[in-house]
Image (tube, rainbow, N blue to C red):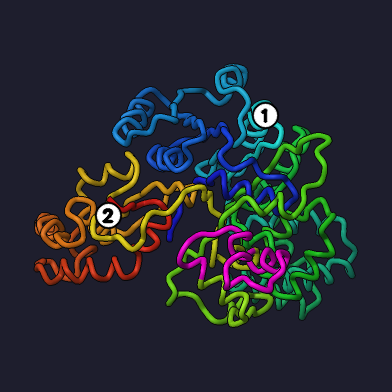
Amino acid sequence: MTTSYLPSPTALNYLGALRGLKPRAAGAAFRYADLTCDAPEQLACLAASNPEGQFFGIVTDDVARARAEKIAKERGVTNLAFKTFDLADLPQLAATLGRLDYIHADSTAETAGKDSMRKFSAIAGDCLAPGGIFNLRYQAYSDAHGALKFLVREFAPEMTAEQSLGFLHELKQLGGAYLAQYPEIAAELDRAIAAKMPDEFFSRFDDGAAASASFDTLLALRPQGLAYVGDADISKNYIELSLQPAAQAIIERCSRHALYEPLKDYALARQLRSDVWCRPVAGAPPATMAELFGGFVYGVTLPSDKIPSVLQLPGTAISLATPLYQNLIKLLSIVPAGIGDFLAHPLGQGYQPTEVIGALQIMIACGLAQPMRGGMIIGNLSSIAKPKLVGDFNRFLEKTSVTGETWLASPVVGCGIAVTPRDALVLQALDRAGLADSVSALFPELEKLAKNPAIASRIMDTTQPTPEMAHHMIEDAVSRSILHWYAYGVLAAA
């Protein structure tokens, strides 16, 4: 299942919980702003998936605003407003939006630089409420070699000859992922180590400016009273899961170094970052494990045939064949459930909450599961003869022509989910005609697609549809996905 790059409140709450920030209570009202809203349909989908929230999309001009408002109106999304602002006009922005619980900004279209960081840090500092969370996506370096260049320029000038040679060895140990992508640089590094001539390698990075937006962001946001939470890509917060043991040892040793984040960028071969920050609540008592993780539901989002028996990670291997993992996978593949739900289920008997939390954290970090909003009673799964799309946002599919990936709102997952064109066509047919007559509803849509061979070839098995093809598409999608569509609140029994 593919979800939007736009971070959901649930995903941000979970990241905060990993760092001890007590999540917002389920169902509590909140305010969310996308400061760089260039995908209004995805923001509308997020708003439809979180009806208790008030969402704001900041767009560049009135033309973009009109287009975005048309999308929201067509989709029946009423908890979303679009505003036209110059982001440099902080007083007006803060006065209009007020205190925000979640802020998202995407400056990946801009080159790495301090001006962009200052702009967004000022907004976060002025507008983020206590307990609020800020997500910033940005280009940390101007090119793929930027992290290495920055580290060489920062460290090398102050090193002795012995320290420089040791630094070369550390760059080799840290840079497994990066050096594998650039074998010519790896070869130069090996030659410099063998010849004990570090300056020859360092001179490769003498030209041009060397900057790290990772470092600039830390300098800009910490004075705003914000605390760094981690990377929105959860796996990158676990160095033991994402790095080789030799690199792990160096990163752990440098955990308090001012250049810790640029060092991680180089080790992870990371040019794009998605940083998550929070404003801690002053005087708040430490949260318990139940308070941190007990309010989420969790779901396994991968098809059963895509779940491996062993997770092969850069630094380790984790067997999923143990009873705890197998039982979690078995239950959460059917229906999202909370930790208490699992412990009360026969599959969860005999386990301690801390065991379950630990296993779930590994599964989430590795992309096998994800925290979800929940808060919805799933309909009668035994009645699938008359399924109907849930919510105005999703019912828009009834009257649209499917030609590509389609976004649907899920009040269970808490964010938009993407379905393939084939699955969208099947969902449309099920909604229009029910299971019994779904072939008669799908076949005319396939005939329309056949008039555009370029699109048809990407969606259908052949460019000439038949009722048998329509039947096969429905049978495949229903057997593979219909339980998830019900479980995620996309479909309900009529």
Q: Is residue 30 above or below residue 243?
A: above
At label 2, the amino acid type is: Pro
- Decide which of tag 1 and tag 2 comes sooner along the chain: 1
User: Magenta span has 338?
Assistant: yes
User: Magenta span has 467?
Assistant: no
Residue 42 lies, in percent from the top left, at 41, 43
Q: Which residue is mark 2?
A: 387
- Nearest the camera: 325 or 306? 325
How many numbered marks are there?
2
Residue at point 9% right, 68% down? 466
Q: Quadrant of the N terminus?
A: bottom left
- Nearest the camera: 198 or 183? 183
At label 1, the amino acid type is: Ala
Which label sits in the foreground, 1 or 2?
2
Q: Badge 1: how crowded within 10 Å, few (<14), some, or many (20+)?
A: some
Instruction: Give me the C-alpha separation between circle 1 and circle 2.
Output: 48 Å
Q: Which residue is mark 1?
A: 122
Q: Magenta segment, which residues?
A: 331-360
